[in-house]
Image (cartoon, rainbow, N blue to C red):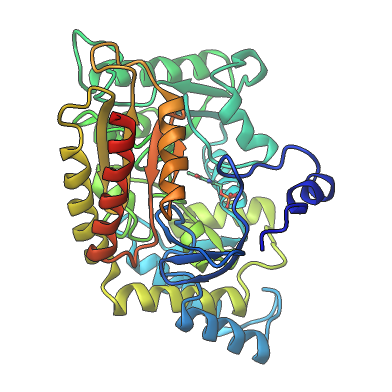
Amino acid sequence: MTDKNLFQRRERAFGTGAPTFYDVPLELVRGEGIYLFDSDGNRYVDMYNNVESVGHGNPVVVEAMADQQRRLNVHSRYLHPGPVEFAERLAALHTADVESVVFTCSGSEANEVALQLVRTATGKRGIVCSNATYHGNTEALLQLVHAPHEPAACPEIRAIPFPETYRPLDPDHPGADAYLARLSEAIDSLERAGVGFAGVIFCSIFANEGLPDIPDGFMSRATDMVRAAGGLVIADEVQAGYGRAGTWWGYQSTQLTPDVVVTGKAMGNGLPLAAAAASKSLVDQFRSATHYFNTCAATPLQSAVGMAVLDVIEDEGLIAAASEVGAGLKEALSERRAGRDWIGDVRGRGLFIAVEMVTDSATKQPDRARAVELVNRLKDRGYLTSNAGAYSNVVKIRPPLVLSADQARGFIDAFDDVLDHIDG
Ligand code: PMP
């Protein structure tokens, strides 16, 4: 039975305001593959979690974790081949200029390292980000969240509108130009203010922004503009990477060419594991400036688990599968727009799909309440999603990569059920 007091106890134990999902929060007790089970024995299909990307309780990963922890786990001031091999394997998977890796325990820490990398290398402080982003929970990274709302409080940050085709910045001239003009202004403004321009940080697929379709040419021209201004490009792949977008890295699907790549979440399938990676010369400069050390990072445990995750992705062909199953899911969801003015847009890459709710297609006014309703009704039917995006009006579909085509069809049936209910 669900412990009715657990929520109240949690409010006291964690402090009020620690976020939960759904009208009635779920108490989960077990996970297996694509499934999650609650304390009443109900089974849910997980259409949301991108951390347990190779499946909940994946036996290969669990075995690697237990085996390494039993054998040895020490911090990184000792020599051990595991973390070295893992860094080499990770670097080899990148198509960007990546040779060396700084391991951390969270995406936030890895993005902090990335900021330090570009600031150390350029000797400048100014960072450009998007205006509806999230890169982590540290004081420096939260400036990227606050910059659009409190620019005066964030003198080293400039936020530009995230590039999108659905609500173009300049409706008379949709395309990349208007966004690139903003980027150029932001770079100039940092230089004029005396902090100088160190670089940009973008999620390669603008996941938190709502997974927009990006105007053609924006990413490649933005990269050129940043480099021409002496800056460096950070690709935040915490959500976009590890096959999520149907390619190893999100940047391969959006033509961003990063200098620094940040990965996390899926890397450890639940074990805290993240990384900032770049050319050896960039990482060398960072290491000599900071002597960075992170107690639980770059350990034999992290690398054993990280290698197991890579093995599963490769051995089970999960990236091709994500691309195929995701394409089918996106097509089926797009078909549901017919006759429903309030499903404004269906977008996505690989197994990451956004269904945007609006009041009507003419005004495109975001309808957060509709998204929340869909999410809760899908949960009632045994499918877990959430809402997200710049206006929180996007139903976010982002299952572990092991979702099968059959399970995707089951989700579409449940989605239809909810739509019928809403259509009345
Ligand atoms: N970058 C992006 C794009 C994220 O979505 C998140 C977390 N949702 C982070 C970084 C921070 O990762 P973590 O929670 O592991 O610190």
Task: Work out whether residue 321 or residue 42 is closer to the camera in this orientation and state it.
Answer: 42
Q: Is residue 38 visible?
A: yes
Q: Residue at x 59, y 64 (%)?
A: 40
Residue 396 screen position, x and y as percent: 39, 42
Residue 30 screen position, x and y as percent: 56, 70
Task: Work out whether residue 43 or residue 346 is closer to the camera in this orientation and state it.
Answer: 43
Compared across the picture, whether 285 is left or right of 19 comes to left
Residue 384 screen position, x and y as percent: 45, 52
What residue occupies the far top of the structure in this picture?
A: 172
Using the rendered view, name the quadrant where residue 1 is placed. Answer: bottom right
Q: Is residue 234 visible?
A: no
Compared across the picture, whether 189 is left or right of 353 comes to right
| Above-or-below relation of 369 to 134 | above
Compared across the picture, whether 16 is left or right of 62 comes to right
Residue 236 screen position, x and y as percent: 45, 46
Q: Residue at x 59, y 15 (%)?
A: 151
What residue occupies the far bottom of the structure in this picture?
A: 71
| Above-or-below relation of 234 to 100 | above
Q: Residue at x 28, y 15 (%)?
A: 178
| Above-or-below relation of 278 to 361 | below
Task: Work out whether residue 136 or residue 212 is closer to the camera in this orientation and state it.
Answer: 212
